Amino acid sequence: MMKRILLAAIVGFAVLAVVSGFGLLNGQSADFEVLEFGSVTVEYGELLSLPVVDIVRSNGTALAFSVVGEKGRIENDLLLIDTKSLSCPKDRVEIVVQSERSRSVVPIEIVVANPPLSPALAIKNQKLFEGESLEIDLKELTTSDSEDIFFEIVSGVGEIQGSEYRYTAGHREAPVAHRVTIKAIDNLGQWHCETFNIIVMDKNHWPEEPYSPYPIDGVEDFLNNLILSWKCEDPDGDSLSYTLYFGSEKLEVLAGQIADTTYTLPSLEPDTEYSWQVVADDGKGGLIRSPIWSFKTKRIPKLEWKRVIGNDGRDSFTKIRPLSDGGFILAGSADAGLASDSSAKVLSRAGWVVKLDGNGYFAWQKKFDMGWTEFNDIIQTYDKGFLVVGKSHASIGLGSGEESSLLAIKLDRYANESWRFKIGGNHNEAVAVVEIEDGYLILGTKSSHESAGKSVVLIKLDRSGSEVWQKSFGGSSFERAVDFNLDPNGDIVIVAETTSMDGEAEGNSGSHLSINGLTLEFSSVLVIKVSINGELLWAKVLGGECEDSPSSVKVASNGDIFVVGSTSSTRGAFSRKTSDYDGFIIKLSEEGEVLWTKCLGGKGNDFLEDFYFTPSGGVQAVGFSESNLERKGLENTPLKRSGLAYSDIWLLQLDVDGNLLWEEYLGGELEDVSLAVASSGDGFALTGFSASSDGDLGSNKGNYDAFVFYLE
């Protein structure tokens, strides 16, 4: 029985709620009554004032009124509405009627009479050529009584910034027509859409100005057998032809209708300034002139002075560096004299440092006699002192002893020793050094504790000569470090010989020769790039079927890597027709991609040892050669008939693309070898060792003497 009573009560309450809700929905309640109220018409711009008693009648209960939104307000039982805030031509305002027990929302329809005109936007069809820009001030083309107009693109191309429409046609877009629709909207919500067409027409754009000349503007270099080059683009992709103007006193037409961006000049006069200009033609009336570029030719360098230095032993310089005072610092080794024991006299060897002034005269020299010592590189340091690196071992006698230490010695400006760094082991050796912001980097070869092989080692020292870190590179066989150089980003490019086929040398095809049970492994060229902290970035192996050996590496200002050396291979990275040794120059990109390889030499063995970049971006290289056909009596000497030939100092210069500009030989009748070169002033100095006492040497104090030649 109780359940039935409870159910009846719930149903009663529900019915009451529905009835009450229906009454409120229609604006009726026990507290107030919503009056029948039609739409209200008011002039635009007037203030509408309606008594709330005309809208709602109270049944004696206090009522509260409010406006939904911001289109009006209640003041002193009046509904006040600014018609400028209403949408035209008709809008609706809702007021809320509230009593203690009831609430109702009453809509009021308001008709705005004589509102402002809707905005009218009139845009004509537009025409423009490829590459041109269109700008339309939409506000100037809009008619409206409202000052507050904004615009949006309904469809089509372009963009609107504020009240300005903008569009730029592409260089290769024509012919095409774009249909664009723009909506203009005023602050009353009134709007108007306007559609117009943009017709893009084909237009010939002139070529861009020719640029990137070679030789670069204003350069002075040996440029006799010269190939001019430049770059030029056309925005339309048209094929271009060129007219070349050239001359030493005035510009004259040298060639016309050139399809390529290169031109091989006839032989030029030395010590002459030339000017040139390129005119690009797209064949459609578009002509553009380059700036007038110039360059000056130099004569093939000639020997200005020489210094032959030595005693009655074997004396040699392996490195020469120019100094800030115009002089030179040299590093190498010299026989230190005879040491006696109970059975024989044996020869020891001393590390040798020599400073010359700008004319080649002695400033000072220092020898480091530590049994057997050889220096490979030297640099001038931040404090005007020097850091020299090489190897040493305590045993004396040529070839005696297996142990050798990697060695670095810091000298002050007067050649007094400040500190010494050594790493002992089996055939350890430092080959190159550079100074960095907070210390020094030393490249060398170090024996491996894990195997019988040797690896490339990179060592960082602080200013006081203490080791900061040490990194090793290579594979499980044999590596010999040769040289390294910093690139413009501060990364380190290392070159070495390798016979390994794993580790950083992975990908090396390897080659060997077996004779009477003895196997000879031929080396390949290993190029490694690491960060300034010694972290590997990439590695590349280059080689053929025989011996390939690098000797020097340098990085150009644009990051390109140049490696010189010698090869006896005829396949693989080195394509040649003869099996004797030729010098090579390899150009790689900063990512290690081979850009070109040049092999140079004659009918004898030829070796390139060192180089520097010339002002025009080419290479000045030195080495030694057996291919000098101008040697007097070369074909009839007993040495030649017996199959032996002595070498000459070999000089050559290449342009930026590896084309040979000139080559020359210096020396005498015996063995003359150049190992290093350095640019200085208007010329360059080269050094090495010689056994000759005639020809360009003129004297010899016994065995091999060290020499310095300066050419200009």
Image (cartoon, rainbow, N blue to C red):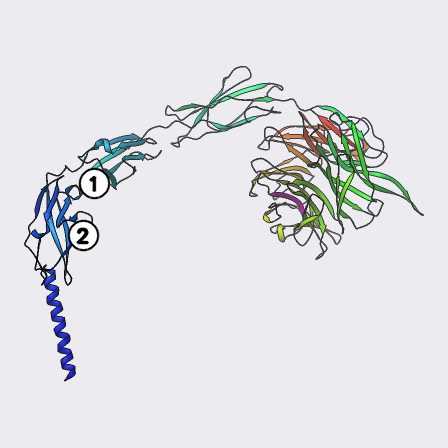
Classified by dominant secondary structure, the portion drawn in magenta counts as strand
Q: Amino acid at mark 2?
A: Val
Residue 215 belongs to the span the image colors magenta: no
In this view of the protein, can residue 549 be seen by the observer? no
Instruction: Specify the label residue 68 is tagged with.
Output: 2
Q: Is residue 373 left or right of residue 345?
A: left
Q: Residue extending furthest right? A: 342
Secondary structure found at label 2:
loop
Q: Which residue is mark 1?
A: 187
Task: Using the image, tell me which numbered label, if any, was put on residue 687.
Answer: none
Q: Earlier in the sequence, mark 2 or mark 1?
A: 2
**Residue 496 sits in quarter:** top right
Nearest the camera: 708 or 549?
A: 708
The residues colored magenta run: 491-501
Give coordinates of residue 75: x percent, y percent.
15, 48
The C terminus: image quadrant: top right
The amino acid type found where label 1 is placed reads: Asn
Farthest-out residue, bottom: 1
Give the vertical position of 622 relative to 457 (above or below).
above
Nearer the observer, 275 or 651: 275
The front one of 131 and 704 is 131
